[in-house]
Image: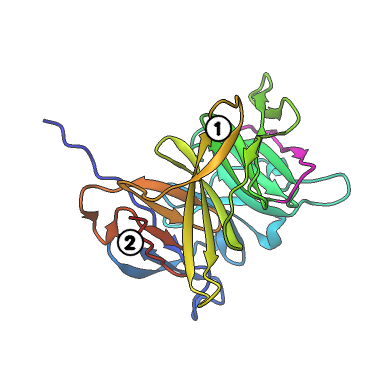
């Protein structure tokens, strides 16, 4: 009988801590162990802000959110080779400000595509492993983008007003990613909730889900709401955010530049419980049952 391997659960990187002001050490919380670990920062990452991450300890980082961009493993110090053109995202007049970078797969794979939110109103793409590869950009004429996500091979952006924007992408003969059409905003019915302080998009139970962090107005305590994207009955190609009352056998890990829903074995996995939300800066335990 073959046993199923337990899921690999993320560590949460604290945004700031008292003794990492020189950016040479990071404090990371392991939910499985229930402990905070001090992780020395590889030299390539010292003085740089983290813009995105991927499984296995890979992070994308840049100084001042403009460049030069590096992709380095936080634990081993290994670095992914980027072309000169990939180290900055340039417009004709100035470098772009990078808000966030996501990975379509492992950065050690030649098929990995990077997708960046730039200047709040645009998206940029590049493919790792192309010696002369660079970035291609597309602006979005709408609300500012706060998150982006690869889902079923397609790229989506989330705006401050909770609109979902589909960026249609393809590839050139040499494999460089390109935008093949103008951004398309999905028609989504609004839902009412208190003032938002953060929104993130994740895949949960095979569907897109919206995670909203906000506060109670009477005591200013933080709480979360989670909404699943669902079809509107009798109205083709129209969607709505439906509030979820349980995460089932999943836990949510929410970070500034990376978020994910992870299945948790029966009971718990180390210190991680099902139906709970874990977030960076402070670890919030929010049961939805």
What's the magenta region?
129-144
Please state which of residues 69 and 222 is positioned toward the viewer in this rendering.
222
Can residue 176 be seen here? The reply is no
**Which residue is pictured at 76% across the width and 30% down the height?**
182
Q: What residue is shown with label 2? A: 31
Residue 14, position in %: x, y?
48, 68
Q: Secondary structure at mark 2?
A: loop
Verify whether residue 96 appears in magenta.
Answer: no
Verify whether residue 139 appears in magenta.
Answer: yes
Q: Residues within 10 Å of mark 2 (few under 14, many from 20)?
A: many
Q: What residue is shown with label 1? A: 232
**Which residue is pictured at 53% across the width and 75% down the height?**
220
Quadrant where the N terminus is found in the figure:
top left
Outermost residue, left direction? 1
Residue 124, position in %: x, y?
70, 40
Report the label total. Answer: 2
Q: Residues within 10 Å of mark 1 (few under 14, many from 20)?
A: some
Whether 249 is drawn above or below 152: the answer is: below
């Amino acid at each position: 009988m073959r046993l199923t391997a337990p899921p690999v659960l993320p560590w949460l990187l604290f945004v700031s801590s008292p003794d990492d002001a020189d950016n040479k050490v990071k404090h990371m919380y392991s939910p499985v162990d229930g402990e905070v670990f001090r992780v020395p920062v590889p030299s390539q990452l010292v003085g740089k802000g983290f813009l995105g991450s991927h499984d296995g300890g890979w992070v994308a980082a840049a100084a001042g959110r403009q460049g030069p961009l590096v992709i380095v493993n936080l634990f081993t110090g290994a670095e992914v080779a980027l072309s000169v053109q990939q180290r900055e995202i340039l417009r004709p007049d100035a470098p772009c400000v990078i808000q966030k970078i996501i990975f379509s797969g492992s950065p050690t794979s030649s098929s990995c595509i990077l997708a960046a939110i730039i200047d709040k109103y645009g998206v940029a793409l590049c493919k790792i492993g192309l010696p002369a590869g660079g970035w291609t950009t597309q602006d979005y004429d709408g609300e500012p983008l706060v998150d982006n996500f690869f889902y079923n091979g397609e790229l989506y952006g989330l705006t401050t007003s909770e609109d979902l924007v589909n960026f249609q992408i393809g590839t050139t003969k040499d494999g460089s990613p390109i935008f093949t059409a103008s951004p398309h905003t999905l028609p989504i019915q609004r839902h009412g909730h208190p003032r938002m302080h953060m929104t993130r998009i994740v895949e949960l139970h095979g569907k897109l889900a919206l995670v909203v962090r906000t506060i109670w107005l009477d005591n200013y305590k933080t709480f979360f709401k989670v909404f699943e994207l669902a079809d509107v009955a009798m109205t083709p190609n129209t969607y709505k955010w439906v509030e979820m009352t349980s995460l089932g056998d999943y836990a949510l890990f929410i970070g500034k530049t990376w978020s994910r829903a992870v299945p948790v074995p029966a009971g718990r996995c180390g210190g991680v419980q099902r139906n709970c939300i874990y977030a960076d800066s402070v670890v919030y335990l929010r049961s939805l049952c």
